[in-house]
Amino acid sequence: MELPGLYNYWVVVFLMMAGFYVVISQGNLVKKLVGLGLFQASVFILYITVGKVSGGAAPIAVEGITSYSNPLPHVLILTAIVVGVATTAVGLALVVRIYEAYGSVEEDEIHAQDLVEDDISEDPPFTESEVGKQ
Amino acid sequence: MEHLPVLVVIIPLLTVPLCVLLDHPRLAWLAALASSWLSFAAAVGLVLQVSDTGPISYLLGSWEAPWGIEYRIDVLASYVLLIVTAMAALVLFAARESVRKDIPEARISRFYAAFMLAFAGLAGIVATGDAFNVFVFLEISSLATYALISMGKDRRALSAAFNYLVMGTIGATFILIGIGFLYMMTGTLNMADLAARLPEVADTRTVRAGFAFLAVGIGLKLALFPLHLWLPNAYAYAPCSVTAFLAATATKVAVYLLLRFMLQIFGLDFSLVLMPLDTLLLVLGLIGILSASMVAVYQGNIKRMFAYSSVAQIGYMVLGVGLATTTGITSAILHLFNHALMKGALFLALGGIAYRIGSTTIQDFSGLGRTMPWTMAGIVLGGLSLIGIPSTVGFISKWYLVLATLEEGLWPVALLVLIGSILAVVYIWKLVEAAYFGTPEGNPEIKEAPLSMLVPMWALVGANIYFGIHTDLSVGLASRAAAVLTGGAG
Amino acid sequence: MLIAIAAIRLRDLFAVVMLFGIYSLLTAALFMNLDAVDVAFTEAAVGAGVTTVLMLSALHLTRRWEDEPRHNPLLPLLVVTITGAVLIYATLDAPLLGDASAPVHQHVAPRYIEKGPQEVGMPNMVTAVLASYRGYDTFGETVVIFTAGLAVMLLLGIQEGPQAHRGRNAIGDQVVLKVVVKLLIPLILMYGLYVHFHGDFGAGGGFQAGVIFAAGFVLYDLVFGEGQARAVIPPNWLHRLAALGVLIYGGVGVVSLLQGRPFLDYSVLAHDPVHGQHLGVLLVELGVGITVFSVVLSIFYALSGRRRQS
């Protein structure tokens, strides 16, 4: 196992987890979306890393070059980027509507307002952090 | 006929731009309804074709499988497609009146467009034989679903939709990571190809981690306990017709994905022997059944009560999968179908009640047994099926599940399953008590739900009883699909 | 990496969004370095461009400052650490960076590289795979974008007509800026067209072109005040355009179906299969471009046209 070859992955993992942490720990809805963006963008880097061939060229056929990087991950990530921005857009629209309805974009405040409204508020307190338990 | 696999998905998908271009509430509804019935017809055709000739492979754009994207319909896929398309067709039939009341008129045609997108996305997930294509269609249906949930009248629908968006996106990203790892180790995205190439590299840590990410990601979409927190509010505050459709289909498709990935791509040996997935599913399934049923008992909002009950029912399915025997998986697949029938009927009935009295809290149920006799009778029959009374579908799935646990000698598990049923008796009884023995408060002008809502609901109630007595079709398909999953995959 | 940490710490949401934009640009640079030119192009246009503009518009409608965090960060930290550990564990057996003998480069990919240019008739393999081999994924992608547009319209509604908020100007009256932008916009639109039709040979394609086109209009709108761009393309036309884009893409597929071939088989579109492929790719890219352009622009309209409520 050579460390330098894996180093790139580890940086990606760190970035991914930074994004994931923002998503599950932050109470601000906009920041959650930024976190999701970070998380997804890091996954994209993971895929593109996989497609790289040392000494390869960008996958556009040019005479005289025989070694190209793998085009398939690029295609997948193009699609994934689009999916990501679509999700962000829908999320932002929801945030705007939530702000108009609740006057806040903080998860705690919104949840507190919800509890008051519930006729019978026997719900266990909502903890986002239980999400990622494996 | 050879194009049926793609038609199931493409018909609803191409109705979407049509709905938007028409921009007329009634025409949009008609177009959506027509295309969902066409799609249902295509699904019926597929079931027949698959049982005649075996699995169908359809090459999109004519590129051979590992290079292009393949649609692959086997017994299980055709069976799940049948459920999804049938539910869409019935729910749309009932939806017109309640949508007209719930959604501002200017947005109705776009609402139907989003509905069709959610439907087409689910159908696409089931039909495809390509791992990345799953992700794409998953996102189509999810994005449409977030929008649909947020259309609920209560402002809590907005926060519920946002929570679902965050959790759903985390789930989808986990699935993406999992697929990425598998691709990294095998170089292919086609499911059959993956299944063939995985055993070679099954021993690597990368594949195992990929498996873990897929399991958690699907678990999130499945609302598997303890990842279910998004579901109750999402179901409770979404418009009724949306809840009916989602409850009957969305989690079912997630169960399908679980079966597809865990049993067919990784193979029974890898998933259940090498990785301790079976025990995990067994335990989580049981906790899910018991805790969600308990919480359901204390709910004052009936929609939310049934939402928790859905979490519990997912527990039954997962439990069946966790048993890892042919009978266990048969019971899971069977319950997939049966639960769609029950919850479809129940949520449609609730839709009728919400349409007339504008509320679904238990207090408002007082006396409904007299004012809305047909709707309440439907709820009672659906509830009996949920409990698992003989001669309903609920009994059939419980029967197979208990049989499967006893086969394995796990009688404490069987006992716990029965306790789950008793809890269901408790919460259904609360409803019945209010509706039939409570005194109607005030408004005597409550009328029976409109006929367009009663007919599809009673069609489902009838199916609950029909398939509870004539089990050949559902049990036959389910056991064949289970046999393929446990025997056919490497 | 530092930027990601900063994004966690900062509570000024405006700065967070800006940092996110910078992060996207850096990611794009990294993609360039890893030979993924098309992806880099898209990430720069989408991550750094579209997402940032949309987020800023949304911030404008909500609040800039975040509250003090009240959550206990231990549990999330634990979850993240476990997940990260699994990921690191996974990479231990992963192929090394740039290793040409990794399975990814052995099984499916060689065909795209070796035969792609002949079978589909264009040198850019990414475009060939995107629009033909995996054209159905791209159809799905177009639908995803359309879904997002539809969802935003359902949530925020459409502002009808240009008279909605005439005269409100985001930046203020600056003559120099206006002149510069007036000169720039035709260039941007030209560039968008170039990117669109050059996608077969170089980096680019319908998606990127759509984004660039939309960016031109967004710029116009920002500088000349809201309502100006709306006068050129009214919002209620946009979602019809978006639907049209999806129909074009799907229509190509239906034509193949009608010819008795599988969905999206382009080879029937002309007598010569390779020619058909070329035509098919061009048409579907057009569909993608139209949908992307109109959805991005209409989401921008929807967010920017909404009055801030306090």
Image (cartoon, coloured by chain):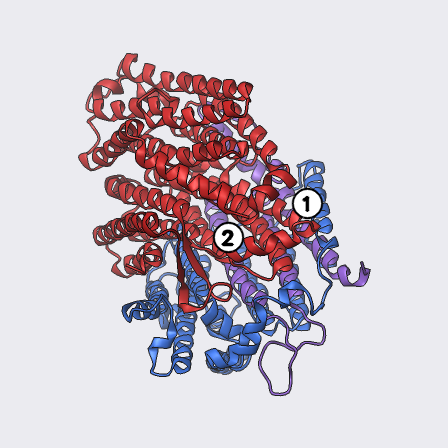
Q: Give the color of chain A as drawn.
A: purple
Q: Is residue C280 visible?
A: yes
Q: Which residue is mark 1?
A: C83
Location of residue B105 in the rendering, given as x and y in whole percent from the top left corner: 27, 48
Left or right: where does residue B78 sit relative to residue C187? left
Q: Which residue is mark 2?
A: A92
Name the secondary structure under disc 1.
helix
In the rendered image, the residue lying farthest to the bottom is A63
Q: Give the color of chain C as drawn.
A: blue
In the rendered image, residues at marks 1 and 2 fall on the same chain: no
Give the CA separation, mark 1 to mark 2.
Answer: 27 Å
What number of labels is visible?
2
Parent chain of label 2 = A
Location of residue B298 in the rendering, given as x and y in whole percent from the top left corner: 46, 20
Name the residue located 39 percent from the left edge and 30 percent from the top edge.
Answer: B303
The image quarter in which residue C146 lies: bottom left
Q: Give the color of chain B as drawn.
A: red
* Badge 1 amino acid: Thr
* Badge 2 amino acid: Leu
Location of residue A92 in the rendering, given as x and y in whole percent from the top left corner: 50, 52
Q: Is residue A102 visible?
A: no
User: Vertical placement of B310 versus A27: above or below?
Assistant: above
Q: Could you classify mark 1 by the number of other residues whose Cα lies within 10 Å: few (under 14), some (14-19), or many (20 or more)?
A: many
Parent chain of label 1 = C
User: Vertical placement of B402 versus B101: above or below?
Assistant: above
Left or right: where does residue B236 sit relative to residue B131? left
Name the residue located 36 percent from the left edge and 49 percent from the top edge.
Answer: B119
